[in-house]
Each structure stands twice: as structure tokens, then as C-alpha cells.
Amino acid sequence: MSESDEKLVNVKIDGREITAPASLSAIQALWHAGYPRIKSVGCLEGVCGSCRVLVRRAGNSEVRTQLGCQTLIEEGMQVMFLVFPRPTHHTYKLEEINSSWEVQTKFHQIFPEASRCRECRGCNSSCPKGIDVMRGVELAAKGRFREAGELFVECVMCDLCLTACPELIAPNHVGLFSRRVTAYFHTRPSNLIRRLEGLQRGKFKVDE
Ligand code: SF4
Ligand code: SF4
């Protein structure tokens, strides 16, 4: 099907009225309308978190946070790209943590705000990847870093959870810390351990 045969839809992106084929994503629609490819451009595969958008669909008052490259345009959709400076990251060096016994204490020194989570779920609502962010923060604050890290495997570091948090917690960096510290002090990932345990119990067959 040629582009001229495609169904066209009218959308508003960053306040601009745009008519574009329905098969395009919000970011592609912006380019289709002739806007330069300089804004919020990243991987275009939904993994880098650069193209954060607010989306409101026709007839629905709810505003959702999504990734522009993963959002197909629809008739009457309103899209606003979110550009905000990335805040200063928490700095730490894993090699300065002498043993796994120190990890929890260090975590609370690096992320003192993490234990102030008020369970408002703003981070969960804002996450375009559907991660249970709040649970991840809670697990990390309790020192359950492996479980916390596993929750953040799909995180694209878009910073939307961080921006939504009234306690200025950086949940995505809590997740990153959890994953790093787990890998640093436990070289075998938990899914590998579970697989090996399954093999030992005869749950899986080895094709030699
Ligand atoms: S956890 Fe935070 S940074 Fe990661 S994808 Fe979700 S909103 Fe974005
Ligand atoms: S937005 Fe912040 S305070 Fe609210 S649940 Fe998430 S981490 Fe906790």
C-alpha cells in the first residue's frame, strides 16, 4: 500500500496540527510534517527512553505518559514531548563497598530519600514500561536488591518515575544500583541459578 492510500489522521503534537498516516508513531508524525529530526531522538525501538510524551486520546480526559516512538497516532490524539534536564545522578563506586554486608548501609547513605517513599504510586502511573516501580523501591530499601533489580530489567531510564516522585526519589537509579550491586557481589544471575537448580533436580533434560 502506498503512503497516499493510507488512512490519514489528524493529531496535535506539541501544539501543532498535523495530518499524517495512521501507521506512524508520534515521533514519525512530527518528522512527516517536516519538523527537524533533532528532538527526543533516540533508538526508536522503545529501549532508550529519550522520547517521553504525554498522550491524551480523543474523548478521554486521562493523560498518560508513554514513549513517542512506541505510540501510534490516532484521530484526535494530543501529544506533548517532555524535555526536562536529567538531574544529577547519585554517585557511588561499587569497588568502595567492601563486602555484601555493607551494601544495605551504603544504599541508605547514597539514597537516603528511598526510605521516605509515601506509596503514592506516582512512579507506577508514570512508567511507560509498566514496571512496579514502587515495589522496587520498597524492596531495595529493605535490602532485597536481587528482587528489586529484577523488577527493573525492562527500565529504559526515561526518568518519568523520577520526575513524578514527590519525595525526589530516583527510582530508576535505585533499580540500577540494585542490578549493579547484585551482579557485583553475586556473579551468577538468579535465573541461571534457578536453571542450574532445576537441572540438578532433573526438571530439565540436557541434550548432550
Ligand atoms: S522505571 Fe522509571 S526510568 Fe525506568 S522505564 Fe519506568 S518510568 Fe522510565
Ligand atoms: S512516586 Fe516516589 S513516593 Fe510515590 S510511590 Fe513512587 S517512589 Fe514512592
Image (spheres, rainbow, N blue to C red):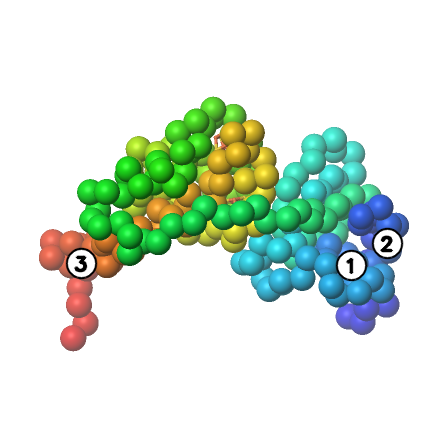
**Which kind of residue does numbered mark 2 sit on?**
Ile
Contact, CB < 8 Å: mark 1 with mark 2? yes
Residue 158 lies, in percent from the top left, at 57, 50
Residue 85 lies, in percent from the top left, at 64, 48
The verdict on label 3 being within 8 Å of ligand 1 is no
Tell me the residue that label 3 is attached to: 196
Residue 75 appears left or right of 98: right
Q: Which residue is nearer to you in this view: 17 or 89?
A: 89
Mark pair 3, 2: CA separation: 54 Å
Give the quadrant of the C terminus.
bottom left
Residue 7 appears left or right of 162: right
What residue appears at the point 62 percent right and 55 percent down from the top-left corner?
50
Under tag 1, what secondary structure?
A: helix
Quarter residue 117 falls in: top left
Tell me the residue that label 2 is attached to: 18
Label 3 vs 1, first from the N-terminus: 1
Residue 52 appears left or right of 138: right
**Which kind of residue does numbered mark 1 sit on?**
Ala
Quarter residue 70 falls in: bottom right
Label 1 vs 2, first from the N-terminus: 2
Residue 177 lies, in percent from the top left, at 38, 48
Which mark is on residue 29?
Answer: 1
Q: Which residue is nearer to you in this view: 125 or 202?
A: 125
What residue appears at the point 54 percent right and 40 percent down from the top-left corner?
162
Give the quadrant of the N terminus.
bottom right
Label 3 vs 2, first from the N-terminus: 2
Label 2 crowd bin: few (<14), some (14–19), many (20+), radius 10 Å: some
Which mark is on residue 14?
Answer: none
